[in-house]
Amino acid sequence: MIIQPKTRGFICTTAHPEGCAKQVEEQVDYVKAQPAIKGPKNVLVVGASTGYGLASRITAAFGSGANTVGVFFDKAAEGQRTASAGWYNSAAFEQEAQAQGLKSFSIVGDAFSDGIKSATIELIKAELGTVDLVVYSVASPRRTHPVTGETFSSVIKPVGEAYTNKTLNFHTGEVSFTTIEPATEDEVTQTIAVMGGEDWRLWIQQLSEAGVLAQGATTVAYSYIGPEITHAIYREGTIGKAKNHLEQTAKELHGLLSRNGGRAFVSVNKALVTQSSSAIPVVPLYISALYQVMKEKGLHENCIQQIYRLFSEHLYPAGESALDGSALIRIDDWEMRADVQEEVMKRWSELETGNVTELADLEGYREDFFQLFGFKTAGVDYEADVDPAVAIPNQS
């Protein structure tokens, strides 16, 4: 079948297997071209099929020669319905890893469930013995608690009072104002339950109790802080409350793991186009302006570049890891440079529909969005017939 992008809001309902495979290949090639990292040897990535999680798996495997286990919740193709992009990404990763002679295993299912945790532990015991790095990179709108069975749903809202600011329809290029009503206390609680640190803690606790965490193991989860312009909807909103919980969890896990020489970090990453960030009002316009400024200054990094820098300069550097006063790893440092933020804010005050292509990188944003799903990738014939049914080697 000929696969074309079909969008619904900030979601693309189709994905292209060859486009996804090409992008995985490009990320692998980037890492291979960099200096090798003296890092982990057996790695578990929870949320491994897209974005920072996929980049972490690629960097560990092809930068450090690590064996990897990836956990993700993606769907295979069914009839005329394509698989999800994460499915195609993972299939391509597995093929690249096998060609390199690396062990790699993919577990498909709900990472929040005890069943998937148990299956992962049994696989690690059987195939790797232990893991020395656990990356937690789960982004989900809902979570069912493994003990109570209660299902929680997250929301993207400010806390305390309504918030009004500019936003962007990146499909049409229209800049408009949006007002978002504040979250209720229950919505804040539910968002923390989905996006906070509880499930990360459960993973580390169960891995530790099962004896599959190596001596001196490291774990890292991902967060975002961003500039003041996004704080009301992000850092001071419901998502920010969840990220505060995640960061507090890191401190607790660090205390637990440090007894055996281990470490726990939260890495604060740069704003990038992801399916999650595309859903947050205000953020697509900010990212578009940020991209243009950072590209003009020669500072722009994509996902794989960010994560390679995280591994090589912070998690496994030749010297000490550079942490800020809150014990967070800050690889958003280039985004938050004073000269970058001053220029972005100057443009923000002027941005409107008529000048958005001049003051912001709208085309770059659109390209990155469609590339999340395997489209707009150089070297791929999108008019050719392709089989949407792609198997993931070593999938369970």
Image: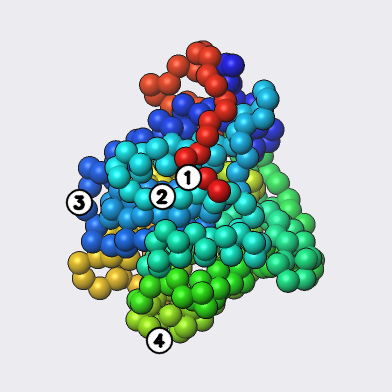
**Is disc 4 placed on a helix, strand or loop?**
helix
* Residue 100, image quadrant: top left
Q: Amino acid at mark 4?
A: Arg
Classify 10 Å Cα crowding around label 4: few (below 14), some (14-19), many (20 and above): few
Q: Residue at x 54, y 39 (%)?
A: 87
User: x and y percent of residue 215 in the render?
Assistant: 36, 77
Q: Residues within 10 Å of mark 3 (few under 14, many from 20)?
A: few
* Residue 27 percent coordinates (x, y): 35, 40
Q: Earlier in the sequence, mark 2 or mark 1?
A: 2
SS class of the residue under badge 3? loop
In space, the residues marked 4 and 2 are separated at their CA atoms by 29 Å
Figure label count: 4
Q: Which numbered mark, 3 or 4, is in the foreground of this view? A: 4
Give the structural element (helix, strand or loop) at label 2. Answer: strand
Q: Which residue is mark 2?
A: 104
- Looking at the rendered image, the disc whose residue lies closer to the viewer, 2 or 3, is 2
User: Label 2 crowding class (10 Å Cα cut-off): few <14, some 14-19, many 20+?
Assistant: many
Above or below, 323 relative to 163: below
Amino acid type for the residue under numbered disc 1: Asn
User: What is the CA distance from the residue labelled 3 to the residue labelled 4?
Assistant: 32 Å
Q: Residue at x 42, y 42 (%)?
A: 94
Q: Give the mark nearest the N terminus, 2 or 3.
A: 3
Determine whether label 3 and label 4 are within 8 Å by CB.
Answer: no
Instruction: Provide the residue designation for mark 4.
Output: 259
Question: Please, what is the three-letter code of the amino acid marked with disc 3?
Answer: Pro
Left or right of 22 in this view: 237: right
Marks 1, 3: nearer the viewer? 1
Tell me the tag on residue 35: 3
Disc ID at residue 48 = none
